[in-house]
Image (cartoon, helix red, strand yellow):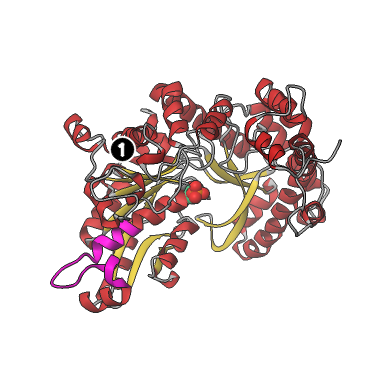
Amino acid sequence: MGKAEVSLEHLYKVFTKPEGRDSKLAQIEEHLSDNLADFLSQHVVTDARSLEQIEKEFAQFSVPDSPQFVSEHAESLLEKLVTHSVNTYSPTFIGHMTSALPYFHLPLAKLLVGLNQNLVKIETSKAFTPLERQVLGMMHELVYGESEQFYQTYLHSAQSSLGAFCSGGTVANMTALWVARNKLFAAQDGFKGIAREGFGAALAHYGVNKVGILSSKRGHYSLSKAVDLLGLGRDQMLTVDCPTQRLSPEKALVLGKEFQQQGNKLLALVGIAGTTETGHVDPLDELADVAQELDCHFHVDAAWGGASLFSDNYRHVLKGIERADSVTLDAHKQMYVPMGAGMALFKNPEDSNAVRHHAQYILRAGSKDLGATTLEGSRNGMAMMVYASLHIFGRQGYQLLIDQSIEKAKAFAKMISDHSDFELVTSPTLALLTYRLCPAAIQEKMKSKATEQSRLNEQLDKLTVAVQKQQRESGKSFVSRTRLTVEQYPAQPITVFRVVLANPLTSLGDLTAILEEQLTIAQQTPDWRSLNQ
Ligand SMILES: *Cc1c(COP(=O)(O)O)cnc(C)c1O
């Protein structure tokens, strides 16, 4: 292949004209749209190559001098990048919340890039702005179920917002807590509010020592990033131990009161609807009472679990979420939308004004520019993907998807419990469970001899780590792992396999094969031999 010319003429072509129907890029495009699964299985190679080896492919550190033909570059991307990517579409990739997507997102993604709308302001997005507001409204209605009159007033109001669309759960949590912080330290008696005067002035004016938020130990690490960023400090992220995997309302109330009695202010109580590690849902209704008693903002992090609201069969698990002042949702998890689709919803649409910003050239007072109340600036039109999914699946379609995931998780849990060499550690509330390898004899031994428990657990931890790594490296399937304190073994945290049943195409046969593979791997480890001696 010849060298691409260094000329404006060549560059204009890069902007306007593809290199021809039979170019490498055109071939890739065709293969992708024809049969994505086939494309992935052909180009994504799973071998035991280490990250260090792959880093060698990306070792060059200066910007290439001269232009390259698009096709030539596409070829190199296939070779260096695609080959060593992770096949998250595989039905045996069951370790994380990232999974296969419905095919229609592929052409829609092209449309999205083709239009390249910037949702920060109407001047660069027009129709996308009302669309995003409508999506926020639909999700708001799913969570809060307010009246028709309510949505008629607020859906497209320039004075308020039902929520903020953002890149993900992390930014959604930050947005919600940012709103809560600015409301807590609002302007009064000559004080112009924390947004104007800053944290130090706010503490002085309100006569407050420290400001904290309260959640269970299972809270997502984005909460800790948020308290850091908002100036509260990570030490003010108060967490309650939860061996049962759910935040105890009694313990939360005690800890919250204690904190307040020391001259501190509680910014928010955070309930989790679907914890990242075990998928449990906090008792939201009771926590709403606790937040009321502590007189603080009630936020629910439903980034992963929120989609369960689509199902009439499981909606009740999230009872109380409608009492939250704000809710985080991630459409890129159980709603099968590509990454970059988070939402913070506000029960009271006026809350969005606590973080409203104006600028002279955009976001002018009275405009409907979405950027006035979002943390992020330039943003693409991901709301279109949510909009499309909401129509293509509909509430009933989502219900079917949610139900089948949870039912599959329950079937898998039973498979694990029935197997003599595995131990179910946490049962699925939603489509997430944890377990480990633990031969029946060892399970018995631990019950009868409490003194042996800690030593055996340590040995089992080593086994779990070894099996998880080996399984990941051999590349047929992927299960993640985490460390938890659980009811059965309160004395020490244990290492467990973590499974998220995200891909609708994962079959019970796939799950059986994953257990068999884990057992085979385990039997070849020294840990297994010493355990079974
Ligand atoms: C995934 C998740 C987050 C973070 O969301 P991102 O989209 O990764 O930023 C926060 N909270 C919970 C409960 C989550 O599951």
| Mark 1 crowdedness (10 Å alpha carbons): few <14, some 14-19, many ≥20 | many
Residue located 41% across and 35% down the image: 308
Q: Quadrant of residue 314?
A: top left
> Which quadrant of the rendered structure holds the N terminus?
top right
Give whichever of 377, 489 is nearer the camera.
377
| Label 1 near ligand 1 (CB < 8 Å) | no
Give whichever of 496, 339 is nearer the camera.
339
Compared with 453, 378 (above or below) is above
Q: Position of residue 259 (x, y in %)?
A: 30, 72
312 vs 528, left or right, is left
What is the magenta range? Answer: 178-198
Residue located 74% across and 25% down the image: 27
Name the amino acid, label 1.
His
Give whichever of 460, 192 is nearer the camera.
192
Residue beneath disc 1: 140
- Residue sticking out furthest to the left: 189
Q: Quadrant of residue 124?
A: top left
473 vs 424, left or right, is right
Residue located 73% across and 22% down the image: 21
Q: In the structure shown, which secondary structural element does the residue marked by tag 1 occupy?
A: helix
- Residue sticking out furthest to the right: 1
Q: Is residue 387 magenta?
A: no
Give whichever of 227, 512 is nearer the camera.
227
Does any portion of residue 348 appear in the rendered image? no
Q: Position of residue 10 (x, y in %)?
A: 72, 38
Does any portion of residue 513 appear in the rendered image? yes
Q: Is residue 193 magenta?
A: yes
> Which quadrant of the rendered structure holds the C terminus?
bottom right
Q: Position of residue 383 (x, y in %)?
A: 43, 35
516 vs 494, left or right, is right
